[in-house]
Image: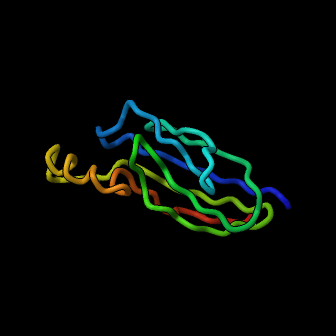
Amino acid sequence: MADAILVIKRSDEVRKDRVRAYRIMLDDNELGRIKAGSTEKFVIQTGNHSLRLKIDWTGSPDVSFEIGESETIEFECEPNKNRWGALADLIMSARPDSQSWIRLVLSRKS
């Protein structure tokens, strides 16, 4: 299989989790970690993949995507913005997929 590029950018605008790194999970395998305000790039195989971010026992929902030869796909992520504060964070922490979110920003062919 040929190679493609996965780019993940993490915002540093939200205070929550600012000093902690998220684990980048590609197809249930840890690909790397991303800190607030940073961008990580990975060479991955083409095909269908599942992407998720994890921190402690929680993380983002899975995001499925397909990437072709010589393509680049870009995602952005940040902590879940909760307007209700610490109490809501505590309640939401019981849900396994409530900590962060990730979204597709750009998919392009090189």
Kindly give the residue lying farthest to the right in the view shown: 1
Coordinates of residue 69 in the picture (x, y in percent): 80, 64
Coordinates of residue 110 in the picture (x, y in percent): 76, 61
Query: How many marks can you see?
Result: 0
Would residue 108 appear left or right of 61 to someone viewing this image? right
Q: Residue at x 47, y 36 (%)?
A: 35
Would residue 45 appear left or right of 106 to someone viewing this image? right
Residue 5 sits in quarter: bottom right
Would residue 44 appear left or right of 86 to someone viewing this image? right
Coordinates of residue 53 in the picture (x, y in percent): 48, 50
Q: Residue at x 43, y 37 (%)?
A: 36
- Against 55, residue 63 (above or below) is below
Q: How is the image coloured?
A: rainbow
Kindly give the residue lying farthest to the top in the view shown: 19
Q: Residue at x 47, y 41 (%)?
A: 22
Q: In this orientation, which residue lies closer to the viewer: 37 or 32?
A: 32
State the quadrant of the N terminus.
Answer: bottom right
Residue 95 sits in quarter: bottom left
Coordinates of residue 59 in the picture (x, y in percent): 41, 51
Q: Residue at x 45, y 38 (%)?
A: 37
